Amino acid sequence: MEENQVVSMPRIGDPAPEFKAVTTQGNINFPADYKGSWVILFSHPADFTPVCTSEFMTFASMEAKFNEANCKLVGLSVDGLYSHIAWLRTIKDKIEYKGMKDVEVKFPLIEDITMEVATKYGMIQPGESNTKAVRAVFYIDPKGVIRTIIYYPLSMGRNFDELYRVLIGLQTADAFSVALPADWRPGDDVIVPTAGSCGVAKERMESKDEMHCYDWFFCTKPLDKDKVLKTVLKK
Ligand code: BEZ
């Protein structure tokens, strides 16, 4: 791909582009096979590379946590199926890293030698690499709509606690019709939608309920951690 070539990239709010692919767990029809679940579709630059290995071990070790939040994981790189299989076997059989060992990657890893899927999703970013996908993360909701996109460069491993925080945040914002402030975590105050009119704002600022208004455009209220976990994790 030319460095200056214009490619269309999926955006937040777009339906997830459709594709059929071969994976380490069989064939998939995306996103139709995932209807009703959240799914994180993520790319990595190459099999048998150190940053990607640390990421796969971390993601695989946290998979149950993501599944509990009704979210499935799907990986992709522009390597072939046999490379994927050999790399994942090496990880399981040989790599011990930060207390993780015998790590089995159970989620599907897409082979994309033709770069068809990576190109469709804007994962090939020629300023970074013409031949490898960047570290892209797409959050797709149960209706197949892209809700968040995060990119990291080749040289920097992702923060998987942050990836989990974003998933829980998206589900919380949906379930409670709220927005979430900087660094929000379950149990922190949430932002209530803007009051809209001065009268409502004044009422809110004077109200004695749990809402706290810093000004007319910035009101928060508590949202109990257990309530969030019960709703999102059904716990
Ligand atoms: C890595 O995963 O270690 C890696 C992959 C591609 C370029 C640089 C680092």
Image (tube, rainbow, N blue to C red):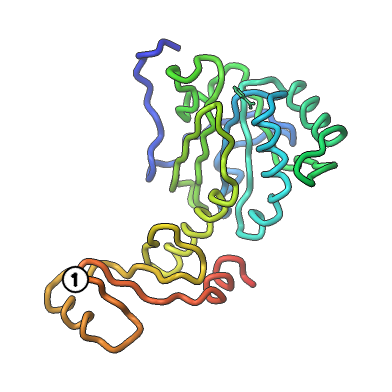
Give coordinates of residue 82: x percent, y percent.
77, 21
Give coordinates of residue 216: x percent, y percent.
19, 71
Residue found at x 60% / y 36%: 29
* In the image, farthest residue toward the front: 98
Find disc 1 in the rendering and name its residue. Answer: 216
In the image, taking residue 97 as reference, residue 112 lies left or right, namely: left
Amino acid type of the residue tagged 1 in the rendering: Trp
* In the image, farthest residue toward the right: 93
Classify 10 Å Cα crowding around label 1: few (below 14), some (14-19), many (20 and above).
Answer: some
Give coordinates of residue 90: x percent, y percent.
82, 29
Secondary structure under the numbered disc 1 in the rendered image: loop
Q: How many marks?
A: 1
Observer-nearest of 89 and 154: 154
* In the image, farthest residue toward the bottom: 208
Residue found at x 39% / y 30%: 9
Give coordinates of residue 59: x percent, y percent.
67, 44
Residue found at x 67% / y 57%: 65
In the image, taking residue 72 as reference, residue 190 lies left or right, namely: left
Q: Considering only vertical position in the picture, is 50 above or below 171?
A: above
Ligand 1 visible in quadrant? top right
* In the image, farthest residue toward the top: 2
In the image, taking residue 109 as reference, residue 141 lies left or right, namely: left
Q: Quadrant of residue 44?
A: top right
Q: Quadrant of the N terminus?
A: top left
